[in-house]
Each structure stands twice: as C-alpha cells, then as structure tokens.
Amino acid sequence: MNRIDARFAQLKAAHRTGLIPFVTAGDPSPEHVVALMHALVEAGADLIELGVPFSDPMADGPVIQHASERAIAKGVGLADVLGWVAEFRQRDADTPVVLMGYLNPVEIHGYARFAREAVQAGVDGVLLVDCPLEESAVLASLREAGLRQILLAAPTTAPARMAALCESAEGFLYYVSFAGITGAGRLSTSDIAARVADIRAHARTPVAVGFGVRDAQSAKAIAAFADAVVIGSALVERLAGADEEGEIAARARAFLEPIRTALDAP
Amino acid sequence: MSTIDDFHAWPDAQGRFGNYGGSYVAETLIAPLAELTEAYLRLRKDPAFIAELDRDLTNYVGRPSPIYFAERLTKHVGGARILLKREDLNHTGAHKINNTVGQALVARHMGKTRIIAETGAGQHGVASATVATRLGLECVVYMGAVDIERQKANVYRMKLLGAEVVPVTSGSKTLKDALNEAMRDWVTNVADTFYIIGTVAGPHPYPLMVRDFNAIVGREARAQMLAQYGRLPDVLTACVGGGSNAIGLFHAFLNDRDVRIVGAEAAGEGIATGHHAASLAAGRPGVLHGNRTYVLCDDNGQITETHSVSAGLDYPGVGPEHAFLKDAGRADYVGVTDDEALEAFHLLARSEGILAALESSHAVAQAIKLAREYPKDGIVLCNLSGRGDKDVHTIAEREGVEV
C-alpha cells in the first residue's frame, strides 16, 4: 500500500488530524535536509512535503521563492532531492514524502526516468503546481510507477471542475489558497469549513487544507473541518538563516510541536 | 516539408499547437483563464467588437503601415529586393500597440477597471499604459529592477501616461521575473483586473489572442504585396524574442507553402558563448510561464539567464506557435549576434534614414543575409517591428560615445 494512503488510513482510525509541513529542499542548508526531515517527523509530522527548487515558481509567494533561490544558488537540483529522500528512507520507512514543485525540472529529467528514480528513492507522491488536471497526461508514467498525483483545489475552482478533481484525486486533495486571493479574503472560516465539508463528501481521498496557517491557533481552527493541515511559508520563514544541524532541528521542533499538541488536544 | 494541412487551424480547443502551448498553470489561475477564454472566444467573432478594433487600429494606431522598398539598402547588399513592413510607424513606435489596443478593448468588455502588464525593455509597458489611460483604466506595470535601471526613459514615459511602475527584485530582476510577479497580482486581484501579456507566450488563450491582434501585420502585408507587386515575397523574416511581431507577420502566409519563413533570434555574443537568448535555435522543449515551448534551461531544469543587446529579445522562452512551426519544418529559426544587429542598425540608418529598434535590427541583419541568397528579382519581406529612438543611449554607451 502506498505510504500516503496507509498514513491517512491510520489517521482516520485514530481520529487524528494530519500535520503536513512543507520545506524547500536545500534551504536553509543542503547539508542538513535529511536531519531536518527527521526532526519534522519527531515533532509530529505525518507527511512531509519537500519542495523541489525551481527558478520561476510562479504560483508561490516571496518566502518560498526566496528559499528556492537560495537553494539553487547552492547548486541544489532534482537529483540531490531524490538522494536526500533515499537517505531519509534508511531510517524512516513509514512517513510519506511528497515532492512539490514545477514541471520543468521533471520534464528535463525525463518523466519515465524520474518516475523510476523517485519510486526507488522512496517518494510516494508528487504535486506539480503548474500541471493541472487538464495537462496531467504527461504524468502517466509517474502514476503507472505508483506515485500518487496530488491535485490542488482552490476557492475559485468552479463546481463542475471541483467534481472532476474530486473524482481524479489520488493520495489527498490539497485545498489551497493564500491571503489576498479574490474570494478567499472575504471567506470566513465557516465558509471555508462549509466548502471543505462539501469537497470531503465527494472526494475519493482525504482533503488537506493549507490556508495561511501560521501557528497552533490557526492550525486548530482548520483541523475542525480538514483531514490534514499543511504548513509551508511560516515554517520556511522560521528556518531561514539557520545553518547548523542542531539549530535547524531545534527551530523545526519549536515551530511544529505546539501545533501538533494543539491538533491532538480534545 | 510538413504534414500539417492547415496552419490556420491552430491552436486546438485546449490551446495546443501540436505538442506545444496548453495551460500549465496552478489551480488558482484556472478560473480567471477560463473567464478570459470564454470572453475572448466570443468577442473574436463579434462583428461589433471587430469593427471597434478596426476603428482604433485605423484612427488611433495609424494603420495600415506601409511596405517600403529599401532601395539603397538593396543596392548596397547587391541581392534580392528588401522590403520593410513599417511597424515602427505605429503610434508608440512598435507593433506592441496592435496587441494592447485589442486586449484593452477585451478588458473593457469584461468590465475590468484595472490593467496590469509586465515589461522588459518598457515598450509593452508604454503600450499598455497608453491604452489604459485612453480608456480611463488604472494601470500597474511590473518591471525588473535591472530593466528599470537600463530603461529609465521608458519608465518615465509610463509614469507620464499615469501608470504605476512596480520594481521586481526577485530572481534575475528582468522580464521573466516581472511576468511571475504580474501573474501573482492577477491571481490576487482577478475580480477587477485584466492582465495584458505582451507576447505570444503564457497560458491559453494568450498565445492565440496576442497572435490574433498582431496578425493584422501579415494580413496587410500579404494584400499589399499582391496589390503592389502582384506576387508574394520569396521569404519573410522577423526578430523573435517571445515572438509576437514575428507571428504577426508570418501567420497570414503560413499556408502559402512557397513563401519561406525565417525567424531571427538573439544570438547575443554568439550561441557558442552561452550568452544569448536563442530559445529555438539553442534551447529544448520544456514548460515555462504556463505553456510548453522551447526554453533555455540547465540540466536541472532551472531557467537560465539570457543575454541580448536588445532587452526586448532577452527572454528564455518563446511563443508555443513558433515551437510548433519549427518542429513542423514550416519556419526556420536562426541566431543573429549583437554585433550583426548593430551593423545592420547602422547600415539601415545610413542607407535609408531609418533608426530601427535593436530588436528589429536583428531582423534587418537576417534580411540582408537572405537577400544575398536570392536573385535580384527576388523579394525579402522584413518586419521592421519598432523604431530605435529608445535605443540610442544603449548604442551610444556601447560604442563609447557621450550623448
């Protein structure tokens, strides 16, 4: 069974909300990516989203763009990221890892080759931000190799399209937006809750929500209606600038542990 | 040659030109693009919209632009006749206005009150600010911090036209980063905002829409050729950065299989040096800015920084229709170096009294090469896409002259 599916089955059985941290691979330090991943797990991560740096991250905000730029400046590429996942797997056989990024690095690497190497490294799914459902035929070899294709849904997604996403979802459906997006700015937590409840009723998979989650309080608010909470920019921002392994791990734990505690509190 | 029956049948409903184009965007952009596609596909067949656009092109842009026989240049070269399609004579001095006039009308029909645009050299920014203020729309132009420094005069022009110019400091601080930033703005403010993309790149429907608005260039030129010369040219050439002026000239001729088509890309300091912007001649298929096309990137898939003396050609991708034409064998794309473009600039200035934009000077250089391949009664039709006034400081600086 794919680790993503297994993990969400466990969470469901235990009535727990999943915690999904995102970090950009190679930031703050290419030397300590694997240590950072283990620290995230120790602090309560249920699944890790590992960002593959790309030079033109059109859909990301400035925090993640700058993290990508720092990693690229240090020479980080897709092969490094796969290597780190393989190393992580030597000590952690269970925590699912999803690579999140953009299509061009995978396209240039070669889809079939990427699929083979990613599975071999122990990657469980991919979220390619600029590959919507309509263009996802190019990812056939990834799906055939067993990688889950994680799809995004947004507050602006039209109803008919949402139905198609719910039908095609694999692993989990990632309901995402950021502060300021049209519609979202006017949506209250209860509006989001209603939408996510509707999606959960129709989706073949669990639904993870990333919605400007910055701390325990905002994570807890979302946990009330989501299967999992994704935390990206706030964590990347917290880690930025640390360069020693101990410091990186300590910051990751200090950030994530209170969120884990809040999610698990009754 | 090619197995394509009708080059005018593209793109398909998904915005694909064969293997290229499409809509490679994040979920947050799907809804705004769908709204735009729906509106544009309706308007492009609406006689009232077409009439409105024609009036603006005639009375505001100053169309049609002439085709001009560059007789002294032709004599100097000693080959086929070189004809210039004079897009430099348009209002604001380049072909860019053909597109911005059209998109601004689409914006108004969609009820949008705010225009955003990205710009490299500033020409598209000026053309966007121009049409925005004319329609009473707010205008915000994203421009790389490096380009702002290089193109101060155009920054000031945009401000004179009432636009706000926002410096972009991420990445290489040039055109591609300005495009990323404009996309972010659009996602955030889509309810009242229309994004005018300046070239035939980006996600569907932009490559289609920008091509449609520039295709007037080739339609006019084809009719002018038949009326004035009773024949079509032997070969067309135009410079290719993103490729909007080139597709504008080429499109009407795509099914005239006897007319050869050659695009001139920026070879910068020479393709072998790596300092160039020749995506088609030296790049590979990839995905950038919402479409599959030829891109310049390293083996990790990171988009590489480009170089050209002309900021307007300094882009690591190219419109997907050009990628399609290249693979179909319908058009060839070759590199023209900075030095060759400058030499052509001077030659055209001294022989014909025309200061061409540095971008267009690449096309002139290619036209000169092509003219030598054909007999004296042959015809090379070159798109003179813009005037060079904006470039005189760059040229003076490069040649060590104090202005």
Image: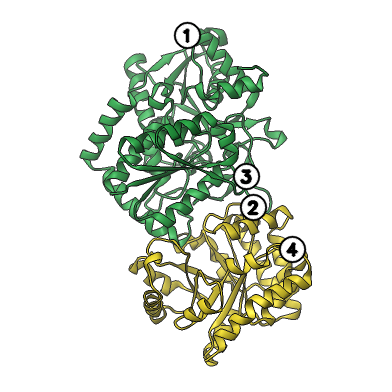
Chain colours: A yellow, B green
Q: Which residue is mark 4?
A: A29
Residue B40, image x and y in percent?
31, 47
Check disc 4: other Cα within 10 Å, few if <14, some if 14-19, many if 20+. many
Residue A43, image x and y in percent?
67, 81
**What secondary structure is found at the residue carrying circle 3?**
loop
Residue B276, image x and y in percent?
64, 35
Check disc 1: other Cα within 10 Å, few if <14, some if 14-19, many if 20+. some
Is the residue under label 4 in contact with that under label 3 (CB below 8 Å)?
Answer: no
Asked if residue B113 lies left or right of residue A137, the reply is left
Q: Residue at x 25, y 43 (%)?
A: B45
Question: Of tags 3 and 1, which is closer to the observer?
Answer: 3
Check disc 3: other Cα within 10 Å, few if <14, some if 14-19, many if 20+. some
Q: Which residue is mark 2?
A: B301
- In three-dimensional space, the C-alpha distance between marks 2 and 3, rounded to whole angstroms, equals 16 Å
| Chain at numbered mark 4 | A
Same-chain status of marks 4 and 2? no
Residue B71: give its label. Answer: 1
Asked if residue A58 lies left or right of residue A121, the reply is left
- In three-dimensional space, the C-alpha distance between marks 1 and 2, rounded to whole angstroms, equals 47 Å
- The amino acid at mark 3 is Ser
Question: Of tags 2 and 3, which is closer to the observer?
Answer: 3
